[in-house]
Amino acid sequence: ATGSETERLRPLILDPQADLMPAAELCEVRAGGALAEVLRGVRPVFGDSAAARAALPELLGPGRSVPTGHRAILAPLRGRRRVIGAAVFVRGTERIPFEASDLLVAAQLATHTALGIDKAVLYGREAYIADELQRTMLPDSLPQPTGVRLASRYLPAAETARVGGDWYDAIPLPGSRVALVVGDVMGHSMTSAAIMGQLRTTAQTLAQLDLPPQEVLHHLDEQAQRLGSDRMATCLYAVYDPVAHRITIANAGHPPPVLLHLGGRAEVLRVPPGAPIGVGGVDFEAVELDAPAGATLLLYTDGLVESRLRDVWTGIEQLRERLAATAQLTGPDHSPPLEALCDDVLDMLGPGDRDDDIALLAARFDGIAPSDVAYWYLEPEDAAPGRARRLARRALSRWGLDDLADEVELLVSEVVTNAVRYAERPVTLRLLRTDVLRCEVGDDSPQLPRQRRARETDEGGRGLFLVNRLARRWGATRLSTGKVVWFEMAARPQ
């Protein structure tokens, strides 16, 4: 407040660390006030005009002022749709006052500034929406299927790469199998994230039909073509069977998976690469490989192994070496902890390796021992339920689960009876003993059973009611060859 106007202005302009700042960053505009009228007019005005003299105190706040005369210009900042702020241009007393032509320069400066700020806000909002869209489309948690342990990681892209379309999934299938999926939509935008969500939903739907991996990729390819001619993605789809200790894999232009064996050997699996999803008119090929107990399968997107500093095959070899080195630390008889293994894999990324987002899915194969599996074929005849009860009781006795025999016999009889009613080919009955006892009954009828409330006069219709009341969980899945009805019981008496 002392000294010449120039001395008061200089620290405000030249010294950003000064205690006295020119104005607050945020100003509340009162409806019907002088500042609102200037902003509504959009055009810059001189600071000594009647409108500016009334508006500047409201804008700058108490205790702040500007030089008198034509030495200040108040310019509204108008974005694409609305006024987003205001700028005050000031000249000291040692310079000539502003002229009428300076109002035009101030208007141009204000326009370019407002459009730049508006664009930055819109860009940030779009990036936030795309990031949230992608994150909400990824699984909140992984399932806990029998015979396999799962872990996953997702890292968003660096700021310069924006949002990508990487995704992963683990989908339980009939027969205690599980589908492992990882994919990458080409491009980095909100559109890529939206396409990723559509393809992931499609893959989940196709998985529930229990189609072979190559057929799943074929239908995903058709779906991508329906979404648009330039909708392309890579995808790897694998199905693990813990009973057979086998895994079936089909690839659509995706980096090959890496299998870490129990002894510490890591190998890049030889899987036909295939063409990316969306190319159209190509066939996909599936291969069936051994999945030994204790081995770990690693599925990933190219952001983990490819960057500006290295090509994809160099990155894959570095990943293989990193897995082998990590396994050596735990010894030949123990597999490295799954969560720690994922963290260690991500540690291989250097400062310049974050050009793309990264999806990582790790599966530890535990398998189900043959001694814990009982499997039979039953002819679709009236005697099938009775035979199923006897076979189930023998299996439970062999496993030391006699206390469950009465309930399991009852539920097996009800489910098999329903299957025999509609089946034309032999019915399958399978019991699996893990941490739970799981019973699966399969037949060739695609019609899924529905639980309904039976009337007092009905002779049937209570089978699924009993299953629902006595079983820990139950469900039915339609297959390409029919359906499977299953239920689970506690493997140890409660």
Image (cartoon, rainbow, N blue to C red):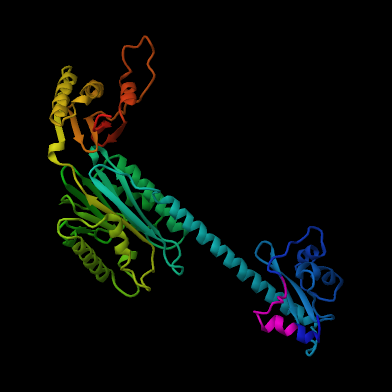
Q: Residue at (38%, 61%) from the top-left corner?
A: 186
The residue segment tinted magenta is 9-23
Q: Residue sitting at 82 percent across and 61 percent down?
A: 33
> Of 277 and 55, which appears nearest the observer?
55
Image spot of residue 382 (x, y percent)? 18, 17
Indicate left or right for 339 with 195 as reference: left
Residue 474 location (% of width, % of height): 31, 31
| Residue 110 drawn at (x, y percent) | 69, 73
Q: Main secondary structure of the magenta part?
A: loop
Residue 363 lies, with reference to residue 4, above or below; the image says above
Residue 15 located within the stretch drawn in magenta: yes
Choose between 120 and 260: the one closer to the eye: 260
233 or 51: nearer the viewer:
51
x and y, in percent, of residue 426 in the image: 16, 27
Toward the top, the furthest residue is 457
Image point (57%, 63%), residue name: 122
Q: Nearer the viewer, residue 326 or 257?
A: 326
Tell me which residue sits at (32%, 61%) in the image.
343
**Which quarter of the rendering shows the C terminus?**
top left
Question: Is 138 situated left or right of 294 in this image?
Answer: right
Q: Is residue 26 left or right of residue 4?
A: left
